[in-house]
Amino acid sequence: MPVHNADIARIFEEIAELLELEDANPFRVRAYRNAARVVGEQRFELAERLAKEGALPKLPGIGEDLSAKIQEIAATGTCALRERLAKRAPAGITELLHLPGLGPKRVRALNRELDVHSLSQLVRAAKDGRLRALAGFGAKTEKRLLDAALAQLGTTRRFKLAVAGEYARSLVAHLEKTRGLQNVVVAGSYRRMKETVGDLDILVTVSSPTAAQAVMRRFAGYGEVKKVLAQGETRASAVLASGLQVDLRVVPRESAGAALHYFTGSKAHNIALRRMAQAKGLKINEYGVFRGERRIAGDTEESVYGVFGLPWIPPELREDQGEIEAAGQGALPKLVRLEDLKGDLHAHTKATDGRNTLEEMAEAAQARGLAYLAITEHSRRVTVAHGLDPARLARQVAAIDALNARLKTFTLLKGIEVDILEDGSLDLPDAALAPLDLVIGAVHSSFKLSRARQTERILAAMDSPFLSILAHPSGRLIEAREPYDVDMLSIVRKAKARGIALELNAHPERLDLSDVHCRMAKDEGVPVCVDSDAHSVGDFDNLRYGIGQARRGWLEKDDVLNTRSLAALRKFLARGRF
Ligand SMILES: [Zn+2]
Ligand SMILES: [Zn+2]
């Protein structure tokens, strides 16, 4: 059973929690937390690298001791320290530790005095008023903990990027109408284009104090606001009807760049920059960069980075994943942009489960500045979508040929999203696939196969001389279905060997490839195509989120297949066939 980075990361995270519970040295706790993050974010399997090269590469924050633990876990699947700590710890209380306001000491007290071992037990004890009787708790704390536990249990949810984007855009449009408003920007994980967003952090600059008041009023009066949680002169928090929390801040112009940087995050990126500031004897916060009391930068983000001799770093890269080093070496990637896309290689029509006709899809794609669109219906196995059999596919091919003869500056490509069956064969015979411009292979069933079998299945499908793109390679649905267990590195390498591209499916539920796997594909020289998987003309909107994720994966224009001209694309598509 191979040990994956995720396994190592989980063990380190558990160690951090258990140490915390024991009131261990906070630096030690932090070291394990950091190690969990660093390991979890590596693009290659550490265990595999160890087996091959006998040593680990240098990883940030991982010294000899942690490195030895990684080797131990890679070899044994566990770690003696974790086992030791787990034996000492009361069962099932780590979730309590995550509650704001509950440190290890209080958790221990709850455990001992009230027999509270879980969030739901905490809720019960708080509702019964038993918490306030404990030394150091009180009625106020009891109420706060109850709210926090309830939030943790039920109502905390993250919003898919595209959904948060809709709320953000209409709220921004509403605020933009305020008199005296100069600039409004949504910071936070939304600006970094993370696949899910917990809340919206909105920053505004205004021309006068009166304008600040006007923005606050306009915000509180927004029709979607369900509840205003707090409102001051320059800060307000509210929950929208959707449950999405929004924090609004009016920031002084001289601090606007520092605030934008601070509230964009990520935390890891900001911590790294703070360390650099400390090394220079400077202080950095949301108000600016300071030498002593004097502000030396902060009106723009460029000025903040400039203090460190760095160029501006695009928000999508700010994860402390090497972007600061790259910036220092003048080696930041020139990230792909939405306007670089020349076409879209995955779309459906009324013939299966789409809502529009061939003509309507072609027109809509063209209206967005695209030069080509591949029509890729489901194959017959997907009965719920009324998938195509060879005869219906042939009819669609003829219809596309007829339409292309009429279209002047736009090309529809003839494709199929063919199901990869459980044994790795494709759902349609070669004779049906041969006349097509491109074949996308997709897994839509048997998600629960073992890692070995799932990987074999997909690798086998990639042996088809007709397959040119692998759709939504991990199969995950955001917060609804876990990715299937598959050896992505093997798939990426097979794609390289076979001249196959990997899809970054921009459907809001999918955003699949992940950012990490985009980077893996790039490292291995495999092109990624950012596709809408449009089922209606409006779905081309989603391409922007696909591009956001591609940028998080450090992809440049040349790394993205559908930035190529139609002629260059056709060359790529012809390559894999033999
Ligand atoms: Zn699909
Ligand atoms: Zn599809």
Image (spheres, rainbow, N blue to C red):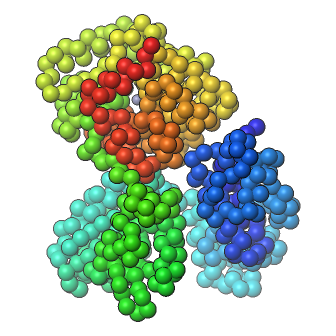
**Front-most of 120 and 376?**
376
> Residue 327 or 261: which is nearer the viewer?
327
- The residue that appears at 18% across and 27% down in the rendered structure is 410
Estimate the x, y position of residue 279 in percent, counting from the top left. 52, 80
Q: Where residue 553 appears, x then y in whole percent?
A: 45, 48
Residue drawn at x 40%, y 13% as measured from the top left: 433
* Left or right of 556, for residue 523: right
Up-down relation of residue 502 to residue 402 (above or below): below
Side of 221 where 82 appears, left or right: right
Residue at 67%, 62% in the rendered image? 62
**Mark count:** 0
Q: Is residue 172 left or right of residue 291?
A: left
Q: Quadrant of residue 205?
A: bottom left
Q: Is residue 546 above or below residue 565?
A: below
What is the quadrant of the N terminus in the image?
A: top right
The location of residue 87, given as percent across then percent down, is 86, 61
The one nearer the camera, 478 or 270, is 270
Q: Is residue 376 visible?
A: no
Q: Is residue 452 left or right of residue 414?
A: right
Q: Quadrant of ligand 2?
A: top left
